[in-house]
Amino acid sequence: MAVADFTEDDIEAGRRLFAADWRFAAAAGSTDALPAMAGAEVAFAGRSNVGKSSLINALTGRKALARTSHTPGRTQELIFFAGPPYLTVVDMPGYGYAAAPKTKVKAWTELIHAYLRGRANLARVYVLIDARHGLKPPDAAVLESLDEAAVSYQIVLTKADQVRDGLASTIASLGASIARRPAAFPDIIATSAREGSGIAELRAAVARVLREREV
């Protein structure tokens, strides 16, 4: 199955989880600056300008929790947001193109890969893919790193409202691309931060991951 499927109980569990009072907790521009591990973390990764900050704001119901910008590369650190005591959401620097010097982009990329490989309480990474463009080489490099580190990840399409007619084929193509990847969760969630579609399902997905860790 390529499209995620959730029950009403799943949706309600996700709603309760993200109804918490979410707030900024920490920022880390290097591995030395990472906060102490506590509870579980879910991280959001994606190319610059894929819409990570907008999606995190939609998930948490906070319009300005994560900083949004029309300039790719504005998120230059790992940003940690705390809600319930047992969950932290991590906004990762965008990879690929960014309006910044190449040395900085290289440093962000190295930080991303180091974090993904070494964070023991990282429950899942949500890799955001722009529904208009599909999987690109920089995305594939991150998926390779996740596979090598055996870090569970799931594909989330952003800006799905802008490709209504081709969305099913995009999901099918992505499903085929990740089918043999060992750390990939097979179901894909299509979202639109602008319209709110898929947000309840993504919340439910996070709640399900946390529940499965407790079993």
Image (cartoon, grey):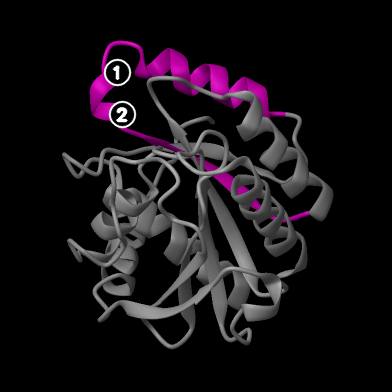
Amino acid bearing label 1:
Val
In which image quadrant can residue 62 be found? Answer: bottom left
Residue 95: % across, % down: 56, 42
Q: Front-most of 29 and 35?
A: 29
* Residue nearer the viewer, 173 or 30: 30
Find residue 196 and report its horizontal and vertical position in percent.
19, 45
Left or right side of 128 for 139? right
* SS at mark 2 in the image: helix
Determine which quarter of the picture holds residue 8.
bottom left
Read off the residue under disc 2: 160
Tell me the crowding category of disc 1: few under 14, some 14 to 19, or many 20 or more residues within 10 angstroms, Cα based: some
- Assess whether residue 174 is covered by the magenta stretch: yes
Q: x%, y% of residue 182?
A: 78, 41
| Tag 2: amino acid | Ala
Q: Is residue 41 above or below residue 183?
A: below
Q: Residue furthest right?
A: 148
Q: Are marks 2 and 1 in contact (CB under 8 Å)?
A: yes
Residue 215 visible in the current orientation:
no
Position of residue 19 in the picture relative to residue 206 (left or right): left
* Quadrant, the N terminus: top right
Magenta range is: 150-179
Quarter of the image with the C terminus in it = bottom right
Q: Is 67 inside the magenta-drawn segment?
A: no
Q: Which mark is residue 163?
A: 1
Total of numbered circles in the picture?
2
Question: What whole-number distance in Å separates the C-alpha atoms at marks 2 and 1?
Answer: 6 Å
Q: Secondary structure at mark 1?
A: helix
Q: Position of residue 176 (x, y in %)?
A: 63, 21
